Image: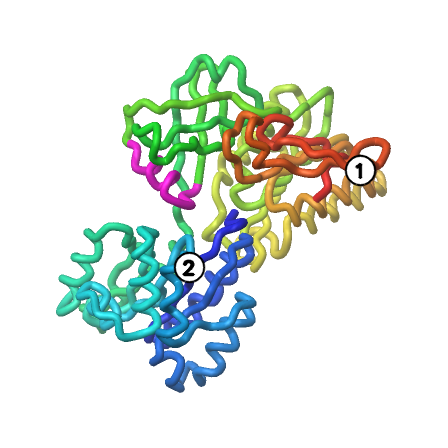
Amino acid sequence: MFKNKTFGWAITGSFCTIPEVYEKIEEVVAENANVMPIISEKVANTDTRVGPSSKIIKKLEEITGNDVIKNMNNAEPIGPKKMFDLLIIAPCTGSSIARLNCGITDSSVLMAAKAHLRNNRPVVIGVSTNDGLSTNARNIGDLLNKKNIYFVPFGQDDPKGKPNSLKFDNEKITDTIYRFTCKSPEIVKEAVAGQFINVQVSDSPITPMLKRPISIHNIDKKNKTIEFIFQVRGKGTEMLAAKKKGEKLCILGPLGSGFVLWDFKNVAIVGGGIGIFPLYELAKAAGEDGGKVTTYLGFRDKNAVILEDEFKEVSDNLIIATDNGTYGEKGYVTDYLLKDLAAQKDGIEKFDAIFACGPKPMLSVIKKMASDYDIYCEVSLEERMGCAIGACMGCSVRLETEDGSVQYARVCKDGPVFDATTVLL
């Protein structure tokens, strides 16, 4: 999801909240982001009931694989070097919010914020303060109206015991998924499962210059509409998310090559994270062709589970797994695919095709499974695209030919769906 992205994650006081964000940092790292941890001088030099400061530093360095930035001298280069695509400050105390609003730079975290904002790049704040509805209310209000500053949704921590306290919703740090329905008879007529569209996100042809490639989630031939789902990752998708019902979009599509169902009678469909979006139309199409559909969906935790009811409607069997076991089965979804493949080998009706979309490590495991059990397999690759029409070669991936040599293919033009046996993952 966050491949080639570098995030700064800054932590100020509010020591009892710090252990809660470890899991969220781990989730972002798991989505291939490079996370640079930053802590305030108070966190770096204060031992509390949560534990010694050295334990916090060690934990952050273990999760991210990067040294903690803990003084102003090391934070200052963040601006000139344009080190981060995004800076998250969570937890962010009331005193840090007040000083940030007043332009005071007297800590490593505030220096990081000032240096990062100098580049007109986003800062996301997870507020955690006992005076959010009293002396700090004005500061929070001011920051809510400042450019490039965003807040994780927050609310009262303890309305009875601490009526002025505000705390961010830790589960919504990464909750930024949007769903659009667009009427387009031309695209509906030609589109198949696995293809994508290229969407102009603003009215300006210059800023941003490039359209955004997004998978087609659902094709409604009766109403001549397509649906697409996306997650806000930067300025472009942020602008798209701000579109209102009734507005017109400039869309190029359908693009790329989709899944090929052939005459399969029993298919397995496997999705991980936001890689599930293009698989709904595939499951629907496979069922309409008379095939049996078993769908496996994997998520990091229960809060990331989406589209369960929709996939139930188009699947004969639906298996949901979460990494930490907070919903459905516990573990990687590929574990449950392997379990069923092993059972089929002992006599149960065998899958005659596997289709998958998700993180590359997951696709690599599925590719090996398909090979081991001699099952046809197609994978849909997620790569950053430039032109999305095959001209720039920015989304090239390596394929292995029949003679063992390597050639390059464009995900936007030759894919995004490929025969798994040809892709070097």
Q: CA distance from mark 2 to mark 1?
A: 58 Å
Which numbered disc, 2 or 1, marks the residue closer to the eye?
A: 2
Judge whether residue 157 can be spotted in this image.
Answer: yes
Which amino acid type is marked by label 1? Answer: Ile
Where residue 196 appears, as percent x and y from the top left, is 52, 28
Residue 191 vertical position relative to residue 331 in the rendered view, above or below? above
SS at badge 2:
loop
Based on the displayed image, in which of its 4 quarters is residue 13 positioned?
bottom left
The answer to whether 10 appears left or right of 220 in the picture is: left
In reply to whether residue 235 is colored magenta, the answer given is yes
Task: Name the residue at the front extreme.
Answer: 80
Which residue is located at x 30 percent, y 28 percent? 203
Q: Which of pointers 2 and 1 lies earlier in the amino acid sequence? A: 2
Query: Marks 1 and 2: in contact by CB < 8 Å?
Result: no
Where residue 70 appears, as percent x and y from the top left, is 41, 75
Residue 292 vertical position relative to residue 169 in the rendered view, above or below? above
Which amino acid type is marked by label 2? Answer: Lys
Front residue of this view, candidates 270 and 291: 270
Front residue of this view, candidates 95 and 210: 210
Give the number of the disc on residue 81. 2
The answer to whether 66 appears left or right of 242 in the picture is: right
Is the C terminus in the top left, top right, bottom left or bottom right quadrant? Answer: top right
In reply to whether residue 241 is colored magenta, the answer given is yes
Give the number of the disc on residue 132. none
Where residue 300 appears, as percent x and y from the top left, is 54, 54
Q: Which residue is mark 1?
A: 348
Where residue 155 appears, as percent x and y from the top left, is 26, 59
- Magenta residues span 231-243
Count neighbours of disc 2 (C-alpha within 10 A) and say few if under 14, some if 14 to 19, many if 20 or more: few
The answer to whether 163 appears left or right of 199 in the picture is: left
Q: How is the image coloured?
A: rainbow
